[in-house]
Amino acid sequence: MSRVLALKSSILGEYSQSGKLIDQYLNQSGSDVTVRDLAADPLPVLDFTAATALRSTEDLSAEQQKIVDLSNQLIAEIKSADTLVIAAPMYNFSIPTQLKNWFDLIARAGVTFQYTENGPQGLIEGKKAIVITTRGGIHKDSASDILTPYVKLFLGFIGITDVEFVYAEALNMGDEMAQKGIASAQSQLETITV
């Protein structure tokens, strides 16, 4: 049985379209799923204390050790999964802060990536990622879609290069357009296996 780590990041709770899409997809997958709701259970923001903790191995305060322990737990969840399913709604052209906080806590030199003479090398390999992104407007394949290349770049940076995007667009452009956007995403998700 495939193991899935599902990340939700919408601040809209039960009204979240990305949350509904990820739930529908996971219900049909038949996989062993771990769900982490980054909005319901927020992670700390990367600040000086957190950044220092994630770069050090010695002389950590109790607060810093808690941050390292949390980072280790998040990374262990990735390593134990075969597939990541990430709900990434577009907020002001980018990902939610909640998902960015997760990115910041798992990007660790020597743990999830390393620097080599040929540049950075990701250390989380052999994983697949499915990114479900919801948008109020239509942005796919346009200059206003900075979310897709950013998420793809970040995941590749830690070694996850098999990344598939599912788009639900035009969700704030009237009921008919929103229904088409959701139906398009649902149709695409039906073809993706984990």
Image (cartoon, rainbow, N blue to C red):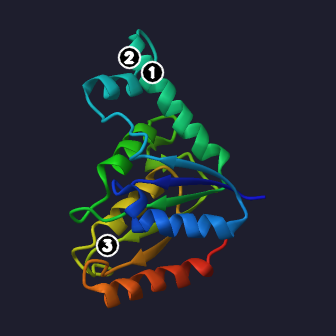
- Describe residue 69's horizontal placement relative to residue 46 as left or right: right
Residue at the far right: name it. Answer: 1
Which quadrant would the N terminus be assigned to in this image?
A: bottom right
Q: Which residue is mark 1?
A: 66
Q: Nearer the viewer, mark 1 or mark 3?
A: 3
Closer to viewer: mark 2 or mark 3: 3
42 over 2 or under it: above or below: above
Q: Inspect the image, locate mark 1, and give the three-letter code of the amino acid beneath it.
A: Lys
Q: Nearer the viewer, residue 47 or 17?
A: 17
Mark 3 sits on what residue? 135
Mark 1 to mark 3: distance in Å?
35 Å
User: Is residue 172 positioned above or below 71 on the image?
Assistant: below
Quarter of the image where one finds residue 53? top left
Residue 127 in view, yes or no:
yes
* Label 1: how many Cα within 10 Å (few below 14, some 14–19, many 20+): some
Q: Residues within 10 Å of mark 2 (few under 14, many from 20)?
A: few
User: Residue shown at 40%/27% (left/top)?
Assistant: 54
Q: Secondary structure at mark 3?
A: loop
Q: Amino acid at mark 3?
A: Arg
Q: CA distance from mark 2 to mark 1?
A: 5 Å
Relative to 106, does residue 119 appear above or below in the rendering?
A: below
Q: Are the two marked residues, 2 and 1, in contact with CB atoms closer than 8 angstroms?
A: yes
Residue 63 is labelled as: 2
Q: Earlier in the sequence, mark 2 or mark 3?
A: 2
